[in-house]
Image: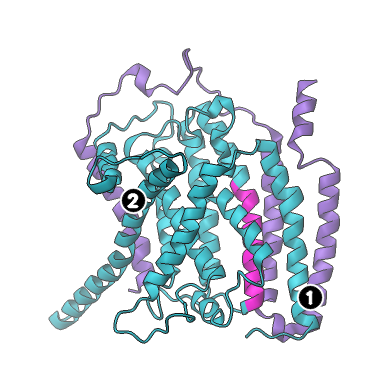
Amino acid sequence: MNKSNLIENLVGLIFNLADVLSIILPVLLSVAFMTIIERKQLAAHQRRVGPNTVGYYGILQPFADALKLILKETVIPSQSNKVIFYLAPVSTLVFSLLGWAVIPFGQGLVLSDLSLGILYTLALSSLGVYGVLLAGWSANSKYAFLGSLRSTAAMISYELILSSAILIIILLTGSLNYIEIIEIQQSIYFIVPLLPVFIFYFISILAETSRTPFDLQEAKPDLQKIAGFFTEHSSVPFVFFFLGEYSSIVLFSCITAIFFLGGYNFNEIFINESIFNLQAIILGLKTCIFTFFFVWFRATLPRLRYDQLISLCWLNLLPVAVAFIILIPSILITFDISPY
Amino acid sequence: MNNLFFIFIFVPILAFILLALNVLFSVHRPDEAKVSAYECGFIALPGQTRSTFQIHFMIVALLFLIFDLEILLLFPLAVTLYQVSIFGFTIGIVFFIVLTIGFVLEIGSGAISLVNIEQSNNK
């Protein structure tokens, strides 16, 4: 290989790195700010002030927390499977961060414009379960094990609802590509014709990210104080679970904005003709609506019992989802509607 | 090298860098009580987790396998619904009817209701 080839390859690598960093760094920042937003918003719901010491209005609190947790000692239980004990949090973080690779932030502003983007997202959200399962199993502590069993069963159950809701979106778009789904919503946002679907979709992503009406690994009195499947994890492995959870909250909010609120489109007020590409900001604002919902539900709703959680999924939501999977294509076929 | 491949390499490296930072900067002084399994108030017995657990979780996992496969099998139909039109849709309906019969059988056999299992355990 001659010298110019080598330089070309090197420049290509640097551009790749810049591309990836331009996605990952804002995502990590948004995850950090998501934690402070949650604390401030919960405080506002309960008429408290919330964290307000570190930085202005406490906005540097997450960075202080992260630095403190990095300086903490990692305790590895002697009877645990050491390799899996480390790999489980790493896999949780990695799979939730990799989901951002196919999210379009604007026309052409996407890391990898896969034609099967939705299948990619579904696959990664399924793989996220492995982190939970392996963490509980490898810690070799009965509390972690019980917590991981409960979380796993809940997550895989609600994944059915999630994929059926996405299936209905696919019925209306006829494509598995994110950009086509966004472009087809220029006429109407899918939240208008598909409002019931949106409701059970949102319930399922609440359960999928194990957020508050469904954070059942912490629900029963025996597991209440010890944080479910990551009982034994401390310092950076714990941070990974935390980052992974909040990253998937932001990711699912973003995906919800793409599916139901038209992603980066906002044609009513704003047509993308300006010098600055404001599409990404619009997508960000729409994402903020759903992250607000996540915290709002945490402040408002009481938890379900575990058997209620499972029967809500299998006996109530799944029949409704199946009914909609039959109803929507029936309407499309009967009235010979071609959305694409 | 395309971007998707690059992010698959980059993100795990980022995670391991954070782990390495922790190893560099934090103290590491394990003692016997610290590295034992968490237990509330008394000494943990080893080997409690590699034993049995409730069959309910396994049943949910099995049901999930079948239903998730079924929904993923419908994705090609959803993508091509306008091309296959009424014929493909009829096949999909037949598929769903068979599946619904199976689902009703599962509910009837009490596979999903955790409460029944708990009550029978208490007897």
- Marks 2 and 1, how far apart in space? 44 Å
Chain letter corresponding to the colour cyan = A
| Helix, strand or loop at mark 2 | helix
Find residue A122 and report its image quarter: bottom right
Label located before the other in sequence (2 or 1): 2
Task: Confirm or deny contact between disc 2 and disc 1 (CB under 8 A).
Answer: no
Total residue callouts:
2
Residue A89 in view of the camera: no
Identify residue type, mark 2: Ala
Chain letter corresponding to the colour purple = B
Residue B1 painted magenta: no
Residue corresponding to mark 2: A32
**Magenta residues, as a range?**
A155-172
Tell me the residue at 73%/44% (across/down).
A311
Q: Is residue A152 left or right of residue B58?
A: left
Tell me the residue at 22%/30% (across/down).
B27
Pick the residue in front: B45 or A226.
A226
| Helix, strand or loop at mark 1 | helix
